[in-house]
Amino acid sequence: MSGASHDLGYLPKTRVEAFSDGVVAIIVTILVLEIKVPRLEGDRLDDQLLAALWHALPLVGAYAVSFMVLLVFWVAHHQLMHSLRRVDRNLLWLNGLFLMILAFVPAPTALIGEYPNAVAGSVLYGAVLALAGLSFAAMRIYITRHGALLHEVVPAAAARQAVRKGLLSPILYGLGAALAVVDTRLAWGIYVIVPLIYILPGAFDRMPHQSLD
Amino acid sequence: MSGASHDLGYLPKTRVEAFSDGVVAIIVTILVLEIKVPRLEGDRLDDQLLAALWHALPLVGAYAVSFMVLLVFWVAHHQLMHSLRRVDRNLLWLNGLFLMILAFVPAPTALIGEYPNAVAGSVLYGAVLALAGLSFAAMRIYITRHGALLHEVVPAAAARQAVRKGLLSPILYGLGAALAVVDTRLAWGIYVIVPLIYILPGAFDRMPHQSLD
Amino acid sequence: MSGASHDLGYLPKTRVEAFSDGVVAIIVTILVLEIKVPRLEGDRLDDQLLAALWHALPLVGAYAVSFMVLLVFWVAHHQLMHSLRRVDRNLLWLNGLFLMILAFVPAPTALIGEYPNAVAGSVLYGAVLALAGLSFAAMRIYITRHGALLHEVVPAAAARQAVRKGLLSPILYGLGAALAVVDTRLAWGIYVIVPLIYILPGAFDRMPHQSLD
Amino acid sequence: MSGASHDLGYLPKTRVEAFSDGVVAIIVTILVLEIKVPRLEGDRLDDQLLAALWHALPLVGAYAVSFMVLLVFWVAHHQLMHSLRRVDRNLLWLNGLFLMILAFVPAPTALIGEYPNAVAGSVLYGAVLALAGLSFAAMRIYITRHGALLHEVVPAAAARQAVRKGLLSPILYGLGAALAVVDTRLAWGIYVIVPLIYILPGAFDRMPHQSLD
């Protein structure tokens, strides 16, 4: 600490990476805790349970969509960290902001699962994921402006292109949030498609591992 | 990212492994959160509490069974990863699908613990574990078809045999789910026996660590 | 897997260690989730809240005691693993059994925190911790009988002594559970003292790091 | 264990570090579980939901503040561990005490989020964070008195200065808790500002990474 006998000007990248991995692993796993056991009473337990499970289908769908989105973010985050040589103080806090928003995702996931037709919930879900995308884009922009953090120099044109691509997912999530006002099913369509763009092989696959760029 | 100065065509296996281990460690540990403290009021607290604990016995049983199943999957997953030299994009998402299904297990566990006699819950429990087994089998099949991911070439006959064995557990879980319609106790019998097949020493033990193969 | 081109007869100790550490880290951290926010309504919010916080004091005490117990088990487990050269199949499942019991601790913790005067809860708490201690002792006994797993040969007399010492904590917890039938406060006394025996410097300190031996 | 063929007098620092990192990663991630989905019934779902989300704003604010505080503690803890050569038995338990208090933070976070105007909740929040800061200061004081644990000798004057600085955050949190009695908004002001002191670049930035010293 004071006296700084060890060089603390740069934190070891590996610890930030491990910490972020841990946080994402926990987020995806606690998503399931939002799916509560229904309280059933009285006769015809099985009929009641089937009705409750039917009612829980949107929650299971929301679980699967959020799980996919978080995995895509994890892969993208992993690749960003992989390109780094070190992490400075500002990047550490930008990463913290990104994790803070990502760790919030279970809350709107539960909300759209419980009330799939409510506009406010669908807007919030898209808004939170757009913010997650924006905070991730902020990390990318910061890194391109502080090339010394990178393993290798990235040409200015390539860096600009990466930043532009990084804005695709927040724009799509913002669009989804806006469409939710018209019809929540349109928003859901967007929310299901966005992670699949990065997961499914296809046009994007020709650019291997461009996840969320 | 773009420009791909680092080879991102293959993700480091160690991170996928650590991430998967983390997810499984969290799943087994949050299982207990499904066991809620009973709300008791009025007189004779101890009598009420004993009744509540008696009522919670199936939940504790479901906890133990799911804990065992998840440990068996963890060992099997660990061994599969151990045989790999690297992880490609498709395997990454197959692994994500496997984790998504596994991370869902606490929900049906709570369901069969709370309503042990309900058919729908017992069917769901078996179905989710069958899906987990199938998604794990899908990883194995993918790997045998992409031998470059493996440390060493596996003879075609041995690979086919491994895939066939890998289908044993989803078939047993599917059978359990089907038997639940007849009598939920039959399903429970299957669900208790399947992990024990892999855990208890015996016939299977002559094939050391063939867990869930 | 099949064909066993890699030696899977012994699992890497480091992964079992990391997995166990992860499980314990999660157990201690989710303990707090058993402390629920009180539902308050109407006037005089602050008076109500103070009353609710007063009511929650045993829960906070139970939280602290379980946190300590789990840390002591973690240190003891760590030391046991440290003495090992490798982990075989049987030890893997014994370790799984130990973790399964340990991961159950949040449930009786919430129970004795919520109903500190209920005999059944206090008995259950002691019984679960006695079982955890017994399963840990089972690991130690197994290891002393399979010396090839150890880094160095332990003299038979020393091994027997370690096993005997390892039975101290389950015996104390069993005693606590028995005393709970007389008076739950006696049980609490035991439950508070047992982890402190290992934590506080004193007579035990002359045997450095004999935690839970 | 007994016989101590391996030197267990000092635990490997890396495991304590990894364990602590894991606990903090879990704490920040389960914070979101305190934000519950509102129970809505009847007509005008969207109006009800908007009202519920408005009501949940303080909870989201409390989530963000606690997330920041915990990240700052994590960075400070990381730096403290980085300066160490090894961890002895006493430091292990001091670290356990620090983690125990930190892992408790989600409870008062939920409390001030749910009842932002209640004095008792605001006092408790500040008190818990002051205790966390004090237990962290205790670790620092212990280390300065046991220089053999450090990588390099720290001059006595610098060590005293570090300890004095380390008392800044518990004093500020104590002040916040005291101000809560006057007006809970004053306390919130303090609670928001303290982590920002360490995060925002500025006067403190000239001392790079002096987080929470």
Image (cartoon, coloured by chain):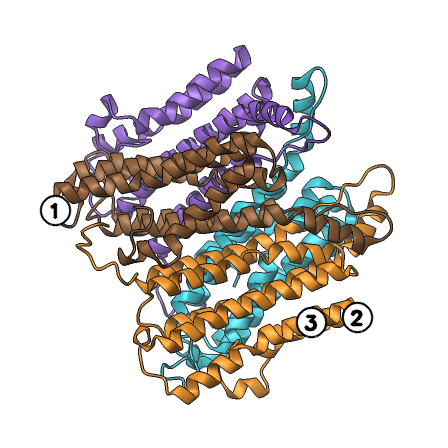
Chain colours: A brown, B orange, C cyan, D purple
What percent of the width, then of the height, locates residue A174?
A: 41, 33
Rendered view: C3 above or below B148: below
Rendered view: D191 above or below A40: above
What percent of the width, then of the height, locates residue B82?
A: 38, 72
Q: Secondary structure at mark 3?
A: helix
Q: Residue type at mark 1: give it.
A: Val
- Residue nearer the viewer, A72 or B56: A72
Which residue lies under the disc numbered 2? B182
Q: Indicate the quadrant containing the C terminus of chain D: top left, top right, bottom left or bottom right.
A: top left
- Residue nearer the viewer, A48 or A15: A48
Q: Indicate the quadrant containing the N terminus of chain D: top left, top right, bottom left or bottom right.
A: bottom left
Dot placed on the residue nearer the N-terminal end, 2 or 3: 3
Tell me which residue sits at (66%, 38%) in the image: C58
Q: Secondary structure at mark 1?
A: loop
Which residue lies under the disc numbered 1? A153
Q: Residue type at mark 2: give it.
A: Val
What percent of the width, then of the height, locates residue A26?
A: 47, 49
- Which of the 4 quarters of the picture holds residue D49? top right
What percent of the width, then of the height, locates residue A205?
A: 31, 57
Mark 3 crowdedness (10 Å alpha carbons): few <14, some 14-19, many ≥20? many
Task: Judge whether residue D21 can be spotted in this image.
Answer: yes
The answer for how far apart the CA atoms under marks 2 and 3 are is 10 Å
| Disc sitting over residue A200 in the figure | none
The chain letter under disc 2 is B
The chain letter under disc 3 is B
Q: Residue type at mark 3: give it.
A: Gly
The answer for how far apart the CA atoms under marks 1 and 3 are is 57 Å
Which residue lies under the disc numbered 3? B176
Tell me which residue sits at (34%, 35%) in the image: A134
Task: Judge whether residue C67 can be spotted in this image.
Answer: no
* Left or right: A136 as drawn, with respect to B203: left
* Left or right: B184 as drawn, with respect to A192: right
